[in-house]
Image (cartoon, rainbow, N blue to C red):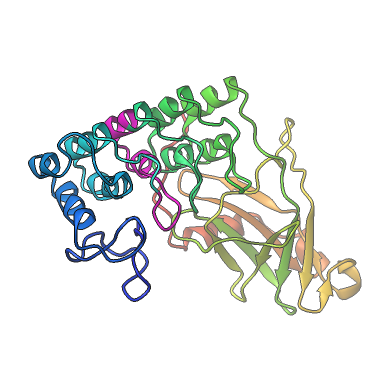
Amino acid sequence: MIPVKMNESSWCPRVIFILSLQTWSASGVAATGFGAQIAKAARTGDVRQLARLCPAVCKNKNDAGLALFPAIENHQTAAGRFLIDRGANVNSEADDGSTPLIQAARDGNGDIVEALLKGGADVGICSEDGDALNGAIVGGHPEIASVLLKNGAGVNASCDSSETPLTLSTFEQEHALSADLTARGGTRRLGEPERHILPSDYRGTVVILFDPHTGTDLKRDPVNRLYRIPRNGVLRVRNYPNPGYRMDDGKIDRKVQFETSEGKVSDPDSKNIAISEVVHSDTKAASYDCYFVGPKDQVDSWDRSTCTSMVSKLSLPTPRSAAP
């Protein structure tokens, strides 16, 4: 669900589009006229009412463009096509920066995606959650991603995040799409340096579960990814694994700095603390990093199967399709 612009007294994240006939207008002020009427008609798929409101061309193209959101949300393809044909602004933006194209790509509405592209929709606009190509990949619609690529979507565009389309498609195990992106010059961005901030007295296994659907947003400083490890040793982040750190020979190459609240763990042995190699695992059900913190003799004898055991006890994201 995408919230649209409303006044401050009535705005609420993820609110249902049409709460009443007084909801929104292109300027963000509660509407009682054309905007509310066209939104209701779009939401219900009332093409006859839309024809009365836009007999030749919609007089307010921005209101008509915002009405595309409830049309797409409610799978009213005919209403969406009608609004596009009558000159609706196909690049209207919701509060989170989403456009009708981003919404349609994320929802998997290929017919509306095609109509929006023919109507001049911009494939490069970024919302808080990425552009239309990102939405299609994360939404599980590789066929729409391919259409967007053929219509100018950036093969390495990443909307101010570190995840390129190839990184996303690889994580989502969309193998054919990953091959297409690679053939078009798609790359994984170089890995970001990491800072792992541990509780000062933490000892044991650490699991960082990459869960883009229900995890919390990863924090960053100007240079690094910040992983603040909780006392239970399990951190669930919404972002994808650090891209670009896996080398061609299978080795891991990334810069990781471990800290406690007391400062850097620059010489772990002197503090009677050692940290194992960071192990990364991609399975059908989960993607995670795992390592052990403790005395050096315990690190040397650490059994990596502890990671699998810990992850198996967690509530995991919806399993992805298995690799071929």
The residue at the point 72 percent across, 69 percent down is 197
Q: For the point 33% across and 40% down, which residue is it?
A: 104
Q: Looking at this view, is 303 or 143 the one in front?
A: 143
Q: Residue at x 21, y 52 (%)?
A: 39
Number of callouts: 0
Query: Residue 263's spot in the image, x, y percent?
Result: 83, 74
Q: Which of the two residues, 246 or 103, is positioned nearer the viewer here?
A: 103
Q: Would you say the magenta stretch is mainly helix, strand or loop?
A: helix
Horizontally, residue 267 falls left or right of residue 144, namely right
Return the x and y of residue 124 as percentages of the image width and height. 51, 37
The part of the image, by quadrant, that contains residue 78 is top left
Is 292 placed left or right of 314 in the picture?
right
Q: Is residue 192 above or below residue 56?
A: below
Question: Which picture quadrant has residue 243?
Answer: top right
In this rendering, the answer to whether 101 lies above or below 19 is above
Above or below, 54 relative to 98: above
Vertical placement of residue 130 versus 6, above or below: above
Return the residue nearer the eye: 255 or 106: 106
Question: Could you tell me residue 138's position as x and y percent?
Answer: 44, 43
Residue at x 45%, y 24% (from the top left corner): 151
Q: Residue furthest top?
A: 183
Range drawn in magenta: 93-115
User: Would residue 110 be counted in the magenta stretch?
Assistant: yes
- Location of residue 20 by image quarter: bottom left
Taking the image as shown, residue 253 lies to the left or right of residue 310, namely right
Q: Which residue is most to the left?
A: 48
